[in-house]
Amino acid sequence: MIVMKFGGTSVESAAAIERVAGIVKARLAYAPVVVVSAMGKTTNKLLAIASAAIQGDRHEYIRQIYDLRDFHSRESRQVVPLAERAALDRMLDEHFQELTELVKGLAVLGELTPRSIDAISSYGERLSSRIVSLAFEHYGMKSAHIDARQFIITDARHTQAAPQYAATYARLAALAKRTAGAVPVMGGFIASTENGATTTLGRGGSDFTAAIVGAGIGADEIQIWTDVDGMLTADPTIMPGGHRVKTISFAEAAELAYFGAKVLHPATLVPAMEKNIPVLILNSRRPDTPGTRIVPESVACGNVVKSIACKRQIFVLNIHSTRMLMAHGFLRRIFEVFDRFETPVDMVATSEVSVSLTIDNTRRLEEIVSELRQFAEVDSERDQAIVCLVGDNIRYTPGVAKRVFGALNGINIRMISQGASLLNLSFVVAEKDIRRTVEALHEEFFAELDPAVFDRGVPAGPAVHA
Ligand code: ASP
Ligand code: MG
């Protein structure tokens, strides 16, 4: 069995869903279980509807619900068999009526709780999974719609729920029996508590669903179908012209996902790694491109670096206290403050009396800074970015830092850390320097490519060095 997950852009329209049907149909021999995201930008739209509701903007939320229904109806009609159109309309009516009731309730309360956010945002995947399942019938496959909420069981941390693996795997073990030869189609992202309250796994969580399902059914492979050719040597939103990475280890891919590679939700690899199931990243617009294969073992490679990841919109805090010179407990006091305000710290660099660290969540920044000021001087710099070189070979290769500093001649590096995992080297530069930084590093580390690991991308146009 394999799991095939299709992201929002892969199911954004009738044409996209038709492509998905073709891709799945060509792989029926592998007994696929299909996981889908909400169609296009539906999750964002649902969240916008919720916020219009609590602002009491009745006209606005009614209009937006209407638009969303219209969008789903228009796209799905083209891919659902004639005989099923009445059932489709009934399904859409039911879902949109329920959604409207829920939204009206929110408007009365004027308050949005994490639990109600989950209830609302679940509609995207609930709709898309039913539509895709009906579409498969239209394209000549037998399909069974599965409500993911009956299989993926989580704790009650709404909007960011964590799976309860034992309960989830026990239910997933029975999945194949339930569907008896038909292709199961379920929504990603959505789940429920033991008590049946709808939860979600966090934004972008459909990848995570795919991995949980793969681990639960003991799949041979977890395929993540998206709109890029796979993992690239550089983030395409920062620098076009990167090369496709054909094979990469779990450890390296996880590092890239933590450091901002949008192509994979960072939690995705955990269940796959535990069960040693390879994860593939594939492009649903170019299904014949081999994509990126993420494998349990490390991958021999002639290049030191496999990819450059970036995390933008980072804050750097510099914390300095001469009062704490020679005193113990400085670091503990600092981290207690971040702990109290539930703010994760990404990167840290320390010396005797000063600590620099980065955060990307600035919700509690003011409170944090004012607490820290009770025992230290603090300054913060906004508009920073983390650039992260990832590769197993970094730990074995002397002189990587020297090459980085050489390549970045003239670009100011604010902070540097060789990750404790030894397979990354990350540093902070000003956001405005990010493109220059990535281009210079890309030239330094990817001028020559190990053909066993990389596939040279379409030759970069002049824009790359502009
Ligand atoms: N639809 C959800 C989101 O937009 C989950 C996903 O697409 O992975 O975040
Ligand atoms: Mg995604």
Image: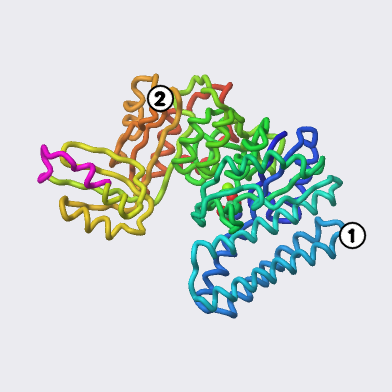
Residue assigned mark 2: 394
Secondary element at image label 1: helix
113 above or below 154? below
Question: Which numbered marker is on residue 248?
Answer: none
Q: How many marks?
A: 2
User: Can you say which quadrant of the picture contains the N terminus?
Assistant: top right
What amino acid type is highlighted by mark number 2? Ile
Number of other residues with Cα within 10 Å of mark 1, as a class: few under 14, some 14 to 19, many 20 or more: few
Q: Pick whichever, 258 or 403, lies toward us.
A: 258
Q: Position of residue 129 (x, y in %)?
A: 71, 53
Label 1 sits on what residue type? Ala
Foreground pick, 339 / 447: 339
From this view, report whether residue 169 is shown above or below residue 449: below
Q: Position of residue 243 (x, y in %)?
A: 55, 33
Q: Main secondary structure of the magenta part?
A: helix
Disc 2 element? helix
Task: Give the residue displayed 80% in from the left and 54% down from the top.
Answer: 134
Judge the density around disc 2: few (<14), some (14-19), many (≥20) Cα neighbours within 10 Å: many
Which part of the image, by quadrant, shows the C terminus? top left
Name, please, the residue furthest toward the front.
195
Q: Which mark is residue 83?
A: 1
Relative to 14, is 30 above or below? above
Magenta residues (range): 322-335
Picture residue at 52% right of the left edge, 51% below the top: 155
Seen at 75% across and 60% down, the residue is 75
Q: Earlier in the sequence, mark 2 or mark 1?
A: 1
Nearer to us: label 2 or label 1: 1
Asked if residue 155 lies left or right of residue 214, the reply is: left
Q: Position of residue 53 (x, y in %)?
A: 55, 74
Please indicate, yes or no, whether residue 455 appears anywhere in the rendered image.
Answer: no
